[in-house]
Image (cartoon, rainbow, N blue to C red):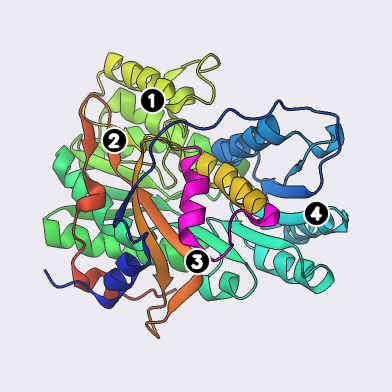
Amino acid sequence: MKKSLLKRSMLLAVLSCAASLIFAGGAKEPPAAGKKSAAAFHIGIATETVSQAEDDLRGAEELIRRYGAVKDGGMIQHITYPDDFMSQQETTISQIVAMADDPLMKAVIVNNAVPGTAEAFKRIKEKRPDILCFAGEPQEDPLVIQQVADLALSNDFMSRGYTIIWAAKEMGAKTFVHISFPRHMSYESLGLRRNIMEQACRDMGIQFVFETAPDPTSDVGVAGAQQFILEKVPQWIDKYGKDTAFFCTNDAHTEPLLKQLMTYGGYFVEADLPSPLMGYPGALGVDLTQEAGDFPKILKKVEDAVIAKGGRGRFGTWAYSYGFTVSAGLGEFAKRVVEGSAKKDNSADLYKALGEFTPGAKWTGGYYVDQSTGIRAKNQILIYMDTYIMGRGYLPTTTVEVPEKYFKIKFTK
């Protein structure tokens, strides 16, 4: 099948050795955390809290485990921004920019790069142009974040708009329910993916349904948004049937969605930002304290729990946490760039840094290409991994050919 300009550009951008990246071998033994000798430079990372995006935060904690916290003489300065970052956007911006006041700060990472990150990076560059600014999973339009970030790393929202529907069909779904809210649908990455999903459903003979849920950053908060999902899932299963796959764009919605699907039926291909830690431990009541940081063991324990609850073949994820990997991987990459062992515009160096945290994982991806101009960005990379179905194994989503027409679908607010 003829590949689109975007697909060709993406494949050209992937490491020359292969279109799919195999990160082999284990992570290196990290230095002991908490060492009192002063670090030569500092790296700042801002993430959401546990309630909004636990995996992102845990990735930052992994950096501290490896390289120590600034307060202990180490390298990493970690902050969390408010859960209601939309209404407290100036606070969020100020927190990020404040990290540049540290004379030893050499890189600032934001994951998720929520609205306001571009403005924060702009202010940082105005006062400290020497500081690297890396955006993990930016929630602002690509051309906005590309203007100020040295690097933006995103899940491949275009290809996944197709591959998630393909996987849902492979699992046996006849209906696909997309759950979101207006703020998320105003983002180009999320809104465009939704449009691609709807077209893919039509082409594959699957009914597409859009359901609106409360925004966790609104007045109802995280608790109210989660309660809504708990109450609505049984009604949705009754309305659409058990052969329905569900997808939500917000991390806070994921745990209650999984919990109810375990009880009432339905399918779950993978989370918006997939991980065996995303929603599964809370939904299943699984304690992963002993497995912390060991994703093969985490996946095995989660998979066993899913199967024990009758979910074999109905629930999926990525073998490694996307959010964890982006936080930790961008931190590792920043460290190497500052030390001179990597270059900020070298994708091979970036993939090696990510590979520290995903041994043996299969990825594919490439540079973002603007829909209007066809120009390939030099500082935004899109990636995705094969989908792992509990009790079934991997679906080869990274080898699925996405038809050309899906890359021509437009985003409309």
Circle 2: residue type: Tyr
Along the line of sight, the residue nearer the viewer: 77 or 309: 77
Name the mark on residue 242.
none
Crowding at dot 2, Cα within 10 Å, few <14 / some 14-19 / many 20+, comes out as many
Crowding at dot 4, Cα within 10 Å, few <14 / some 14-19 / many 20+, comes out as many
Q: Is residue 165 visible?
A: no
In magenta, the rendered stretch is: 337-357
Establish if 356 lies above or below 90. Answer: above
Instruction: Choose mark 4 or mark 2, whichever is in front.
Output: 4
Residue at 20% of width from left, 38% of height from top? 241
Circle 3: residue type: Gln
Which residue carries the number 3 mark? 380
Mark closest to the chain's N terminus, 1 or 4: 4
Tag 3 secondary structure: strand
Mark closest to the chain's N terminus, 3 or 4: 4
Tag 2 secondary structure: strand
* C-alpha gap between disc 4 and disc 2: 38 Å
Tag 1 secondary structure: helix
Along the line of sight, the residue nearer the viewer: 169 or 275: 275
Name the mark on residue 105.
4
Q: Are marks 2 and 1 in contact (CB under 8 Å)?
A: yes
* C-alpha gap between disc 3 and disc 4: 23 Å
Instruction: Choose mark 3 or mark 4, whichever is in front.
Output: 4
| Figure quadrant of residue 407 | bottom left
| 373 relative to 289 in the view: left or right | left
Quadrant containing the N terminus in the rendered view: bottom left
